[in-house]
Structures are given as structure tokens and as C-alpha cells.
Amino acid sequence: MAAPFLLLLLLALALRAPDFGNPIIHSDEQYYLLVGSRMWHGALPYIDLWDRKPIGLFLLYAATRLLPGDGIVAVQLVALLFTTLTAWAIGRAARQTGANAAGALVAGAAYLVWLPLLSGRAGQSPVFFNLFMAAGAILLLHLPALARRCDRRAIVWSGAGACLLAGLAIQIKYTPAVEGALFGIAHLYYLRRAGAKPVSLAASGLFWLALGLAPTLAAIGFYWQLGPAAFRAFCYDNFGSIVARGHYSYPMELTLRRLAGISAQLLLLVLCAAVAIRRDRARVEIRLAIAWACAAFVPFVLLGVFFDHYALPLLPPLLTLAAVTFGRHRRIALGIVAAGLTVFAVEAAIRPDDAPGVRALAGVVKANSGNECPYVFIGDVIVYHLADACIPTAYAFPSTLAYAPEQAATGIDEAAEVRRILAHRPPVIVSASRPLAPWNRQSHAAIETALARAYRPVFITPRGDYRAIVYLRNDRPFRR
């Protein structure tokens, strides 16, 4: 038991250590760390800093600030631990579907390899909540054995554990609610199979539902007691803004291209899972694993935008099924993992190292902001954190005010907020040589007018296939 975990830990370390200290792995994680850090200084999500993710994610990031350093390596180390534990849990779940020890270990290793291929190199939300879902799946897959023994007491406590795990996952991102519902329904079914009476079923179901909702109800209760304005902000940001954002549609060509990329990344794993299903579909644990995979697939389809990291929750159930095939065809399994490692190595080799440039940019922002707040209109929001700078808006995540997908989804007039920020004449504005999504045209017009009238570029650094630019207000001398 210890040896597989140690092997997985070493593989995770080898894959993830080259990124330790890199502050710009993904824009989402930059913002989570910024919010988590500012919470220690009294900032509250949804009131002082806007976002639609559950507060549990920000609390997790805030907790990493208890470790030494600026939080960047700390988050990456915590993510390393979560990924290793998840890989190990996938192996345990795979054993229950009929995989042998070798197949289970390869499935765990494949999880570690495929995470970075789908933008899971550091601290994306599924990197954390996948652990809770994989642990819940272990309980799910043990249900047939418990029902055969008519061990109703064990099923009740298994349901309690699975639903509480799902509840914790839901407070990292709301999409695991579908998997959590599956866990609860499956436990009710097997509790009935074990001979429970209707009253016992109802009581158990209510108990599990309460445990699954408890973390979210705690968050709701916290914002309720802060007053009506805080509660309205919490409700809109967490729920209303999701519906409002759905009014924007990405171009069909872009959506299909993203979906094709994800499909290509997952193809080998899906084929191995399909082989296991075809051969062992009569096995009840296989059918439960299929149900788990379907539950994970539902939010992926419903969200419909197909960012690659949205596919990360598909990995645990797919690999739990694929592990059966891995164990029977070890050469094929090792070849698949080797193929994944090859893609990983190629991507790492061609990926530009922009981190030093962004740190230098943050140094310029810090040196030239004085006691005023800079404004990151487009670019890396981690600049606020690296520059130890104040933030001029609650809508600090750049895409919120700058790009069309968020237009009319924040509950405010985004362009008016940009104009309000500019009216305070920020000493420094960070922008870019091109947009990364369609513009919010009114916001873009406001920033272009301000830059042309009162700012000059003083620092430029490469950032992927564009350039990040620091603009300094004309009445301020440039400080290096």
C-alpha cells in the first residue's frame, strides 16, 4: 500500500517540480491565490473581490498562505499532495472494478501524466475536488459487497461519507453536485437492496442530503448574517451570474476546435475504458463506474464551452475503468503512458518561459505605483500579488471587465466600472498587444482613450504569443 503511493508521489514530483515557483501557470490560479491572500487582510469574496467560484476554493487557497513564502510554491506543493492522493484513490477504486495491482498503478500514473495535458499543471479546482470524488467513488463501488452482506449500518455510514465528500467538492466547484447526487441515489438503492424499510430509507436519504448540503449551507449562512447586501452579492455571484454568462456564445468554430482537442487527448483512455466495459459489463462494479463517468460527463456537456481543464473531472472515472484493460495488456498500458509522457515533454520543451518577464513587469509596477493602485486591464492578475499592490476594483480578474463573455454577467455596467477606475488616474496600467478573447467594446474604447491621452509605454515583455505592456502616467517619472 505504501509502495504504490511512494511511486506515484515520485512521478508527481518529477512532472510538477519544474513548475515550482512559476506564478503564471494559469490565469485562474493566479486569481484564486490573489483572493486567498487578500482574505488574510480582511477582503471577502463576492463583496471585496468578485468571482463565481464557491468560497471553499478561496478558503483552500487562503489556507496555503499559512505555509512559508509568497504562496506560489505553497499552493503547488498542496496541489502535488492532492494529485498524488487522487492517483492513489483511483487505483483503489480500480481494484474494486476488477483491475489487478499493475493496472491500478498504471491508472494512477496515467492520471498524473494527463493532468498537465489538460491544464492541470498546478492548482485548477478539479485538481483539488477530484480527490473528494475519487474517495467517494471508492465508497460507491463497495456498495454491492455491503448489500450482499445486508450490512445496512455500513451502507448508511458509507452514504454519509460519500455525500459529505461530495459536499466538500461542491464548495470547490459546483459541478460535482451531479456526481454527489449519483452517490446518494446509489446508496439509497443498495440500502433498499439490503432490506431497509421505507422509513429508514427516508431518514438515511435526508441525513445524507443534509451532509451533502452542509458546506454550502454554512457558506450561505455566513453571508446571510453579514446582512442583505452581502447576501445578495453572494447569491448573484454564485448563481445568478452563471445564468447571465450563458447569454454569451463562443464562436462555433472555436467551441468545436476545443472539443476536438479534448477528444484527442482523451481518446486512448476512452478506448481502454470501452474495452473494459465491453468485456466486463455484466460486473456490477463496472456498471457503477459507468454511472460515475456519466455523472462527471453531464456538467462537461452542459457547460458547453469546452475549456480543456473542464475535462479534468472525467479523468478519475475514465481511468478507473481503463485500469482493467491496463492490467490485462501491460505493454499497451505502458505504451499509452509513454505516449502521454512524450506529449508532456514536447509541450514542456516548446513552452516559453515567461515567468521571469512577468516578475520583472511586477517589479516595474511596484516601483512606479507609489501609494496608489495600479490597474491590470489585460494580463496576469498575479501582478497585484507580486507587486504587493492595492487593487482598484472588486472586479480584478482582467477578463471580467475587458472581454465580451462576461459582459452583462457581473451585475454591473462593466464599461462604467472601467471608466470609474480610470477617473482615479491609476499611476500604472498593464495591458497587452492583443486581446485574448473578444473585446467588451465599451471597456476597450475607454482604456484606449485613456492610454492615448495620458499614458506612455515603459516596459514590454513577451507573454506567449503576445506582449505584456506597462503604461505609466505621463506626469510620473519612470523608476526602474
Image (cartoon, rainbow, N blue to C red):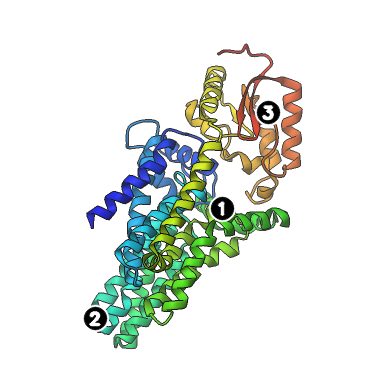
Q: Which residue is mark 2?
A: 151
Q: Can the viewer see residue 3?
A: yes
Q: Can the viewer see residue 219?
A: no
Q: Which numbered disc, 3 or 1, marks the residue that appears first in the sequence?
A: 1
Density class for disc 1 (Cα within 10 Å; few <14, some 14-19, many ≥20) is some
Residue 376 is situated, as x and y percent measured from the top left of the image, at 60, 32
Asked whether 450 or 399 is in front, the reply is 399
Amino acid marked by disc 2: Asp
Residue 49 is situated, as x and y percent measured from the top left of the image, at 52, 41
Q: Which numbered disc, 1 or 2, marks the residue that appears first in the sequence?
A: 2
Q: Between tags 2 and 3, which lies in front?
A: 2
Instruction: State the mark number for residue 237.
Output: none
Does residue 362 lie above or below 141 as drawn? above
Asked whether 325 or 25 is in front, the reply is 325
Instruction: State the mark number for residue 423.
Output: 3
Amino acid marked by disc 3: Ala
Residue 305 lies left or right of residue 8; in this view the side is: right
| Secondary element at image label 3 | helix
Q: Quadrant of the C terminus?
A: top right
User: What is the C-alpha distance between the residues marked 2 and 3?
Assistant: 67 Å
Q: Between tags 3 and 1, which lies in front?
A: 1
Instruction: State the mark number for residue 308.
Output: 1
Q: Residue shown at 36%/56% (left/top)? A: 86
Q: Residue shown at 32%/76% (left/top)? A: 143
Amino acid marked by disc 1: Asp
Q: Quadrant of the N terminus?
A: bottom left
